[in-house]
Structures are given as structure tokens and as C-alpha cells.
Image: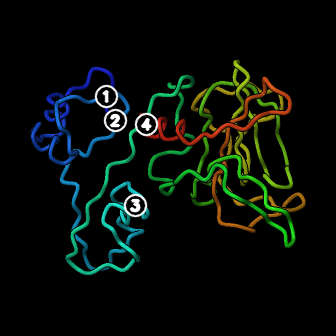
Amino acid sequence: MVKPGDTLWKISLAYGVTVNQLKQWNSLPSDMIYVGQHLATSDPYYTVKAGDSLYSIANKTESTIQGIKQANNLTSNALTLGQRLYIPPQPSVAQPNMFSEGIFPLIDKTYDAFTNTYGDARSYAAGETSRVHEGNDIMAKSWVPIFSVEDGVVVRYGWSELGGWRLTVKASNGIAFYYAHMSGYANGIKNGATVKKGQLIGYVGSTGYGPQGTSGKFLPHLHFTMYDTNVNPWKSMDPYLYLKWWENR
């Protein structure tokens, strides 16, 4: 991801490639680049090997199945040995107007590539009216550690029928960060506790969708969202661009 002060020349030196290669791999018409832009710094083509699947290739190349299929006009998940696939760089991300120094809540390589699920329909009981998904789901194994994305104060802690063991941390500007479906909390986490950016706050799980202690109704993951608490009722915010910015800082 292009950072302030970067040029194609500086990036080429850092990765041991040429400026012309960077321009070719990224279809750049000129030497102009911008902060937040994602660039391929190696040959963006991948040759399918024995045992490969779109899922494994997406994980190895930090891409997504859908992104690879769209870039290569694939109509199915079927692959052939020796097939050459173009791996698109991650979408460029604009720097958010707040929390640009935040951190991603999970450690690199402990979670799967994720897409924006904010606004998707959700329901968990037969006959229940679908509701709008107010966050992003990041798939990871149970007990993967979760870290606070920013400084704040714990304002909600404990069990929620939908969110399971969940936690809400409110920043000084009134924006709250919501972490749900956790398997447990870190020591010292309680209502009113002060939390620092990067502090361990809990662990990924699959809790929720029922009375206290319910677990395993879905695959383990972190449900993360943001709320503006300066309005009543709180208004959910799409956290995807924040997450992608933090992920690639």
C-alpha cells in the first residue's frame, strides 16, 4: 500500500524490481501514484499447481475467490493444472477521516480474507424476519486473540442473545467499536475499564444466537462494527474501509 512520500522509484528499490515492471503489473499510464493505492510488487500471474483450489490460491496471494474469478472471467471454481491466473491487487483504500492510526483487531495470518458483509440480510430462527447485518464478519479459529483497534472505555460488557459474549468500547469522540461472538474476555475487561489501542481484549469464538452460553450455531468469527453514539438511537457505521485501511497500514 502506497504510503506518504512513496514514489515508484523508492518502491522499486525496496522490492528489487524495476519501475517499468511496476507500471506494467499495475497498468499504470504514468509514474503518478497516490497514498492508499495498492500495487502488485511481483508478477501478478499465478500458475495453478497440483492440489490448488481457488480458496487456497486466494489465501496464498492475499486475494479473494470472487476477485480472482472476476479478473479471469471464471464462471465456476474449476481449475486446470498449469492454468495461468491474474491475481488482482487489493482494492485501493482511501485514508479514513478519523482513526487512521488505528490497528486491525486480529494479528496477520490468523484470519481469512474477508469481504464487506455490512448491510447483508441476517436471521437465525425459523420464521424470523430478516434483519440488516450491521458489521463485518472476519472468519478465524476459536481463541484467536482480539485486540482493541483504538483507545476507549468499555461501555457494554457481557452476554447478548445475538452477539454472545460481546464488548463495546467507546472512543473519546463518541464512536463505539463493537466486538461480538467472543469465546472469552481478557483479564481486566469490565464495564468502565479503560482500554488502550493494541490491548488484548478477548478471543474469537462462536457464541450467541440463544440464551447465555449458547455456542456453535455458526463458524467461529469476529463480528466487528462501529456505532455513532452521538445520536439516539446509536447509528451503525460501515466499518469495512476502516478495517482494510488498518489491515494494510
Which of 4 and 212 lies nearest the eye of the viewer? Answer: 4
Q: Residue at x 63, y 57 (%)?
A: 221
Which numbered disc covers residue 96?
none
Residue 239: give x, y in percent of width and height.
Answer: 60, 39
Circle 1 Cα neighbour tier, 10 Å, few/some/many (<14 / 14–19 / ≥20): some
Which numbered disc covers residue 93?
4
Residue 64 figure quarter: bottom left
Q: Secondary structure at mark 4?
A: loop
Q: Are marks 1 and 4 in contact (CB under 8 Å)?
A: no
Which mark is nearer the camera, 3 or 1? Answer: 1
How far apart in space, not on screen, are marks 3 and 4 (Cα)? 20 Å
Q: Earlier in the sequence, mark 3 or mark 2?
A: 2
Residue 216: give x, y in percent of width and height.
Answer: 73, 68
Q: Quadrant of the N terminus?
A: top left
Q: Amino acid at mark 3?
A: Asn
Q: Which residue is mark 3?
A: 59
Q: Secondary structure at mark 1?
A: loop
How far apart in space, not on screen, are marks 3 and 1 (Cα)? 26 Å
Q: Amino acid at mark 4?
A: Val
Q: Are marks 3 and 1 in contact (CB under 8 Å)?
A: no
Q: Residue at x 9, y 40 (%)?
A: 20
Which of 204 and 248 lies nearest the eye of the viewer? Answer: 248
Q: Which residue is mark 1?
A: 34
Judge left or right: residue 207 versus residue 199.
right
Q: Secondary structure at mark 2?
A: loop
Residue 28: give x, y in percent of width and height.
Answer: 20, 39
Q: Which residue is mark 2?
A: 37
Residue 220 figure quarter: bottom right
Which mark is nearer the camera, 3 or 4? Answer: 4
How far apart in space, not on screen, are marks 2 and 1 (Cα)? 6 Å
